[in-house]
Image (cartoon, rainbow, N blue to C red):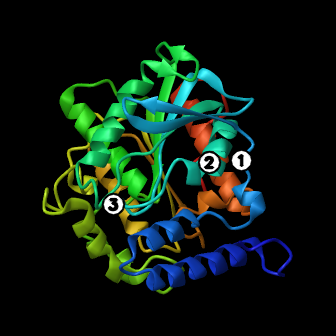
Amino acid sequence: MNEPGRGLSPREAVFDHLRGIARRVQSASGDLAALRAVIADYGRLNSVVSACTAKVTETNLQGMAAEWVVSDTSDPDRRLLYVHGGSWLAGSARSYRSHTARLARVTGCCVLAIDYRLAPENPYPAAIDDCVTALRWLQEYGPHGTGAPRQCFVAGDSAGGNLVLGALLKAKLAGHSLPQAAVLLSPATDLTWGSASLRTRAHVDPVLAADRLPALTEVYLQQRAAADSPCVSPVFADLAGLPPLLIQVGDAEILLDDSIRLATAAAAQGVPASLSVWPHMPHVFQLFAPCLPEADEALAAIADFLRYESNDNGPAMHRGT
């Protein structure tokens, strides 16, 4: 981890860290355990970023490992399901604890983080099915037992943002009740990898490599669905009826246009979608709060958005930088 005091600005420290992650990913090619270990370190910039001040309670969600992350500001009647990123094949609730703890504190929600099934052992649609199960469970159970929440939200980053959208689409088709709002951080929305920013932003992205993305699609899908099917690539889906979306993305990442295209499609289909593009920020920069000021601002914007959508008499929705 890059501890403070190296003479780098917060942004430079984050980019330096992410370039190191990219080098380690390349070295781990073909070694799944090593790759998972590298991805688990994505947000571990230093001990300040990695600190977790919330109360964590592990739970069993219909056979799925999960945990409640609750701060001293959390209201049990305001619940947020968080779906971690990790390229569909890595990541865990534990590796995201510092991030979910900060979300719990700033939003006033009790955060439910899940260990959905990972590829390649569990290809599509296992992870989406787990997210649908968690969404339904969240509407019946809280951190202190049974009972429906007053407000229910969902959020996810990168591959987790993709899974959130897939789960919302699947829940909508099944006629299940949906959360009041969804927050998507640098979501992958087109697994055919057709966004122009894979080329136009490659020179500024410190960590993601476009030439590795098609292999992720193969590992995740394993020929169980087409890459352009709606729950796999939500940018091609019928989005009508989804809850309001807040989409945050950095402009120093190759997935920039995945967010822009999603916001455009959602708005065209009548879904309230607030797109916030953050200058000079990398993929899922929100993980680097409190050391990165823009990450703190983005988390505050998420809190404002959820208050606005839940009519909690909070400040007007912050629409980002």
* Quadrant (top left, top right, bottom left, bottom right) of the C terminus: bottom right
First along the sequence among labels 2 and 3 = 2
Q: Secondary structure at mark 2?
A: helix
Q: State the residue at coordinates (45%, 39%).
A: 65
Q: Nearer the viewer, mark 1 or mark 3?
A: 1
Say left or right for 87 vs 68.
left
Amino acid at the residue labelled 2 = Arg
Label 3, residues with CA under 10 Å away: few <14, some 14-19, many ≥20: some
Q: Secondary structure at mark 1?
A: loop
**Which residue occupies the foreground of this view, 207 or 112?**
112
- State whether residue 181 appears in this view: yes
Q: Is residue 210 above or below residue 50?
A: below
Q: State the residue at coordinates (27%, 56%).
A: 235
Q: Position of residue 173 (x, y in %)?
A: 19, 33
Label 3 sits on residue: 261
> Would you say the residues marked 2 and 1 are in contact, meaning their CB atoms lie under 8 Å apart?
yes
**Which residue occupies the foreground of this view, 53 or 290?**
53
Q: Position of residue 218 (x, y in %)?
A: 22, 68
Res 211 label: none
Name the quadrant containing residue 42: bottom right
Label 1 sits on residue: 52
* Quadrant (top left, top right, bottom left, bottom right) of the N terminus: bottom right
Q: Secondary structure at mark 3?
A: helix
Amino acid at the residue labelled 1 = Cys
Label 2 sits on residue: 97
Q: Position of residue 66 (x, y in %)?
A: 49, 37
Name the quadrant containing residue 260: bottom left
Q: State the residue at coordinates (13%, 62%).
A: 223
Instruction: Measure the C-alpha gap from mark 2 to mark 3.
Output: 30 Å
Instruction: Measure the C-alpha gap from mark 2 to mark 1.
Output: 6 Å
